[in-house]
Image (cartoon, rainbow, N blue to C red):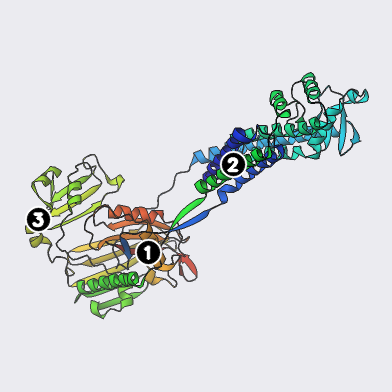
Amino acid sequence: MSHFLITSTISMAALLGLYHLLLEREKMHRFNRFYLLASVVFSLVLPFLTIEVYTEAVTESMPVMENLPYAPVAFAAPVVEETDYLSYIILGIYILVAIVLILRFKVNISRMMVKIRSNEIIPYKNARLVLVEEEILPHTFLNCIFINKEGYSLRAIEPELFTHELVHVNQKHTLDVLFIEMLKVVFWFNPALYFYKKAMQLNHEFLADEVVVAGADVAGYQMLLLQKAHPATLYPLASSLNFSITKKRFTMMTKATTQSKALMLKLSAVPVITGLIALLCIETVAQEKPVSKESVQVMLDARQTNNERRDAYYKGVRVIIDDKANDVRIDKVFENLTEEQKQKYHFYAPEAYMIKHPTKEEYERFKDKKGYALQIDGKEVDNAILNKYKPEDFAYYSGYTMSRKALTKEKPQIFRYQLYTPEYFEKHLKGSNDHYPGDTFTMIITKEFKDDKVVADRKIVKGGDWEDVEFYLKQDIPYNPADLDEQPEFPGGMTGFFTVIAKNFKVPDVEEINALKIYVSFIVEKEGTMSNIKILRDPASGMGQEAERVLKAIAEKWKPGMKKGKPVRTLFNLPIVIKK
């Protein structure tokens, strides 16, 4: 709605400005009448006009989507959105004013109709003369000309005045005024419409004067208008002889505009209209090239690499799965699980630790105490200590982004980074993620019921010396994709989803990007929207924050997943792999 209001107002103001600047003072009144009406219609249609100009998108870095084994995620209770009372107040004011204007418009019409029905009517050429008792100047509404009854009986009304009002009738000037009045009821807050009405009514007077002076003495007609000078009629919908701009009318009666000048002035509207379309309607669309076979292969290779990492991580581990929700019991060595079982229960395999030095740019950013909190070998340090080291002095680093709600006065930094010296890396990190830390992996899935409704879903994963628990505080629990009858589908499939992210992802200025992975999680709702977007792991350099921004900005809707013929919520865990 705001786009419509802004676009239409800009267009009306620009075209009306051109009218007052170049067209109003020239004698080409018929064109001006068309121009004013067309300007309003054009401005109301313009917001709905979109011209797409396609350009080839340039993508320096390509995010690659692949399937990710399950990573535990904790979902908070749903947030109840606050009611936006301000929007309701604004809507109420708009409706109230619109109702008042509708009633006023109806009253004005009724007054004219009552005036017509309650007075004597005499046919006169293509019009009807309405004889009224009041002392009034002749004025017109539709095909009715209102004149003083006594003046008509005494033949005291000059023929030039009849000619003037007949022009209003024959050229149907009342319809122009009614059109603007109806628009003012709906768009009463648009000041341009009020100026358009004044410009139209003045142009109507120019048109009527033009016909009168063509068959009469100009000086005599001007003298007659001065003699009849009188406050304007009390009927705002009528075309009145007096329009309080007598000086402009007198000037226009003696004005002459050559055909060549008139043509040039008419053509002056073309660049203005073209400029409005270019400014307000043209939308540049970055058109991606069709995904190449090489890009698809990169995606497949990344997925295969991830599965190989998972299989190596759980090799030889006994897997016990007690899925009470689906009445499934599994007790096997990991290698004996089917690929479908591995995907369904989402086995999470952390990345292996490898030597990774921060880039020079990253290292300089880490020195910013306001933005970054640092640890070296697990101990908190002051950022200034980095001046004693070089990036190559650290064998590995990692980091994550804090949500603003989690920030404290003691630790206001959004970014938290850990750096590890070669000695610490060799002793504590190297090889620690190569294999699952225990000989048995246990997953227990239970559901709690209350009044025959699911109120919670717990997933407990045990193994080695660690335990992860998922707890969903929702009745409408999201499904894993493997449990669905029909998978959620993004427009254009996963390739389309990948393309949207690739087009909008802005990679931070990092010298060396070697397949950095951002692990993300989100839910595809029943309506196809994405919610609960979370960053499970951020490889640093603002990648996770950028991934979250891109995912939240996606406007396209998914076709939701289906279970037993009904749309359901679906949980996705995916990595975005950034390659230079």
Q: Which of the two residues, 82 or 175, is positioned nearer the viewer here?
A: 175
Residue 155 relative to residue 250: left or right: right
Between disc 3 and disc 2, the foreground one is 2
Residue at (14%, 65%) from the top-left corner? 432
Q: CA distance from mark 3 to mark 2?
A: 72 Å
Q: Reply above or below: 268 against 134.
A: below
Which quadrant of the view contains residue 112?
top right
Q: Quadrant of the C terminus?
A: bottom left
Q: Earlier in the sequence, mark 1 or mark 2?
A: 2
Q: Amino acid at mark 3?
A: Thr
Q: Against 509, is 114 above or below? A: above
Q: Which mark is residue 324?
A: none
User: Answer yes or no: do the residues labelled 3 and 2 have beta carbons within 8 Å?
Assistant: no
Secondary element at tag 2: loop
Q: Secondary structure at mark 1?
A: helix
Question: Is any atom of residue 534 visible in this view?
Answer: yes
Residue 183: in sight, yes or no? no
- Residue position marked by numbered label 3 in the rendering: 421
Residue 563 location, x and y as percent? 45, 70
Quick one: SS at disc 3? loop
Q: Residue at x 73, y 32 (%)?
A: 206
In the rendered image, which residue does mark 1 sit on?
A: 498
Query: Earlier along the polypeptide chain: callout 3 or callout 1?
Result: 3
Q: Give the farthest residue toward the bottom.
A: 336
Q: Amino acid at mark 2?
A: Ser
For disc 2, the marked residue is 268
